[in-house]
Each structure stands twice: as structure tokens, then as C-alpha cells.
Image (cartoon, rainbow, N blue to C red):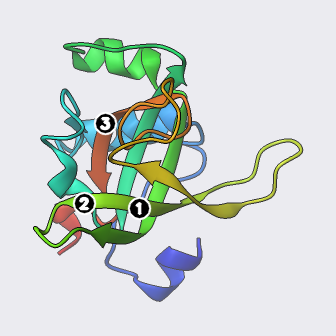
Amino acid sequence: QALKARCESVETPSLAAARSAEGIARWYAERRELILIHDALAQSDLIKPGAVLFFGQEQRLYRNLTAKQAFQAIYHVGIVVSVEHDTEGRVVSYKMFQGRSPGKPAAITNYHWRQPSRPTFPAFGNGEQQWIAFARLCSASSY
């Protein structure tokens, strides 16, 4: 609601219509603004501040997802707040704002790497959750 108050022309999903991560993804998809991620490294140029990233369930590998499969797989969502690049301009890591959940306060996390520190962490994932979809915080229809 704070975004809506500051940026009246920005279209955002209502809490009633899109409360879950899947609901938010569907809202973007209805506007043709959800991009499925088939190769996190090849599509890492999408990772910029304001990017809305959607993640699958922990320890699951998703390949060649269709939109329908992606909606069923989406487990978590976060918003990129900063990005680190290497000398060649490739994304190395990013920080992401994540909402609260039972036992965890809302926070900015910084463990999202091109080359993760653990073998079970996928590139640019959220821990063991694979990055599977992308949208821009402000939809193109808002401009």
C-alpha cells in the first residue's frame, strides 16, 4: 500500500487478489510480464534492483517449465535491492528483500550468488530454491 500511495500511477496487485507468491506471479502473467527462467546464468542480466524473483521449492530441479508448471512450483518471492557485477559486467551476486514468515522477520539477504557456496544451492537461487521466474516491480503498463 505504501508504494501505491507514493506512486499513484503504478499498477500493483491488490492484497485480496494476489496474496501468495503464486498469486503475485499469476497477476504478472495475466499482464504478460512474467518471464520464465530456463537458464539462470544466461538470464542473469534480468537481475536488477526492482526485479521480482520467484523461486521453486527447496531441493527441486526444474527444467523446461511451462507457465502452468511454474505456477504450481512457485514457493517464494523476493525483490532485488542491489546487484554486484564483476569486471566484465556479469552479475556476481545480489541482495534481496524477503517478507516475513512465521519465526522470521522481513529482511535483506545476501547469499544469492553466481557460484553458490554449497553444492545444493542453484546459481542465483534463494538457498536451495531454484530461481524460476522474473517480473519487474513496476509493470510496463504503469509507465
Separation (CA) of disc 3 from disc 1: 16 Å
Identity of the amino acid at label 3? Ala
Disc 2 to disc 3: CB gap under 8 Å: no
Label whose residue precedes the other's in the sequence (3 or 1): 1
Residue with the mark numbered 3: 133
> Does 7 appear above or below 87?
below
Residue with the mark numbered 2: 91
Indicate the position of residue 8 as horizontal and vertical percent values: 40, 81
> Does 50 appear above or below 103?
below
Classify 10 Å Cα crowding around label 3: few (below 14), some (14-19), many (20 and above): many
Residue 49 seen in the figure: no
Label 1: element kind: strand
Label whose residue precedes the other's in the sequence (2 or 3): 2
What residue appears at the point 18 percent right and 63 percent down from the top-left corner? Answer: 141
Indicate the quadrant containing the C terminus: top left, top right, bottom left or bottom right: bottom left
Disc 1 to disc 2: CB gap under 8 Å: yes
Residue 112 seen in the figure: yes
Most foreground residue, 37 or 23: 37
Residue with the mark numbered 1: 94
Disc 3 to disc 1: CB gap under 8 Å: no
Identity of the amino acid at label 1? Tyr
> Does 61 appear above or below 118?
above
